[in-house]
Image (cartoon, helix red, strand yellow):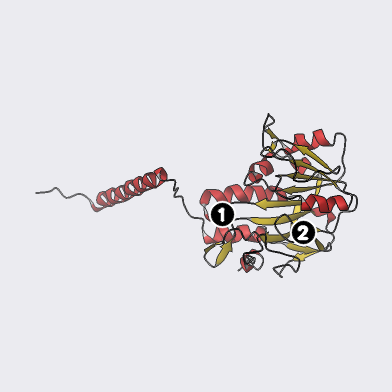
Amino acid sequence: MRKQVPCFVEGYRGILSHIMFNHQIKNVLLTHGILISQVTSEREVKEFLSKVAPYATDKTLIRVGGDEDGGYLIPNDLQGVDYCFSPGVGKTAKFENDLASRGIRSFLADYSVEGPPVQSDMFRFDKKFLGVTNEEMFMTLQVWIEKSLPNSSQDLILQMDIEGNEYEVILDTPKTVWERFRIVVVEFHGLQNIFNQYGIKFISYCFCKLLSSFDIVHIHPNNILPPAKRSGCEIPNVMEITFLRKDRVQRRERSTVFPHPLDRPNLPHKPDVILHPCWYKGD
C-alpha cells in the first residue's frame, strides 16, 4: 500500500515538475534560436507609452531629406546650428545634402563603408562605427564630438541610424554631451521588445535618459515591418523619433494628429504604418 503524502507536498511536486518541464522546453527551443521570456504586463506597456507620448510645440515641423527613407521631420529651429553628426551612412545622403543647402555641415561615420554616397565639401567622414569604446573600428559619441569640434560649445544636430546599437550609445553618452544637441533624430530598432520583461526595462532606461533633457516632438513608424499587436496596442519594430531640447520649447501640448501631413512611407511601394493611438491617446 502506497503511503499517503500530504497534499501540500504533492502540490509542491506538481509545481516543481511543471517548472522542470517548462525549463526543458525553453532549452530545446533555445537550441533552435528561439528564446522564451516573461511577457511584459499591460500596465507596464501603458506606463511606458505614456512617458514617450509626443508633444506639439511652438516650433513647427519641417521635412528634411526627401520623401522616402532618409527623410525626417525636425523642428524648424535651425538658426545658429552649423553642424550635424550623422552616424550610420546609407545609400543616400539626402538629409545631409538638405542640411548643407541650409549652410549646415555634417560629420558622418560608418565602418562598413568607404565613405558617404556623394562627395561634398560640407561632409567629413570617419570610417568607424559609433559605440561604447574607442579603438580601430569604434568610437564613442563624446570622443567623436571632441575630436571633430575641439573647444566648441555651439548647438548641434544628431541624426542616428545605427541598426540597434543606438541603445548602448544612448546609455554610454553623458548627459552633458546630449545637451550639446538641440535636435536629435533617432531611428529606434527592436521596439517590439517592450513586450519582453527585460526589453522594456532596457528601452525605458534609454528613453528616460533622453527625456530628462528633451521632449519628443514627432514619431513616425518605419513601414519595413508590420507592427506587433497585443492588448489593443500596436508596437512598430522600427520607428523614427525626433527630440527637441527642453530649453528650446516655449509652449507644448500633446500631439493628437497622426500621421503628420509631411510624413511619407519609408518604402514607397508598401503602405505606410500609421501610428496607433495608444502612443498618444493613452488608450
Q: Nearer the viewer, mark 2 or mark 1?
A: 2
Whole-percent x, y for residue 66 in the image: 77, 59
Q: Residues within 10 Å of mark 2 (few under 14, many from 20)?
A: some
Q: Is residue 70 visible?
A: yes
Mark 2 or 1, nearer chain start: 2
Foreground: 51 or 274? 274
Going by the image, does 96 lie left or right of 7?
right
Residue type at mark 2 is: Gly
Front-lying residue, 7 or 89: 89
**Mark 1, residue position:** 194
- Residue 275 drawn at (x, y percent): 64, 65
Out of 158 and 168, give the one closest to the viewer: 158
> Is 172 left or right of 235, judged from the image as shown?
right
**Which residue has dot 2 on it?**
66
Can I make out residue 183 in this image?
no
Quadrant containing the C terminus in the rendered view? bottom right
Three-letter amino acid code at the position of disc 1:
Ile
Snapshot quadrant of residue 60: bottom right
Residue appearing at x 77%, y 36% in the figure? 144
Examine the rendered structure and indicate whether residue 26 appears above or below residue 72.
above
Within the image, what quadrant is residue 59 found in?
bottom right
**Rendering coords of residue 127 (x, y %):** 72, 35
Q: Residue at x 72, y 64 (%)?
A: 263
Q: How many marks?
A: 2
In this rendering, is residue 107 above or below 183?
above
Residue at disc 1, secondary structure:
helix
Q: Position of residue 265 (x, y in %)?
A: 68, 63
Q: For the residue labelled by badge 2, is the local secondary structure a helix, a strand or a loop?
A: loop
Q: How far, Cα to Cα, is label 2 from label 1?
A: 30 Å
Judge whether 233 appears above or below 165 on screen. Answer: below
Q: Nearer the viewer, residue 172 or 61?
A: 61
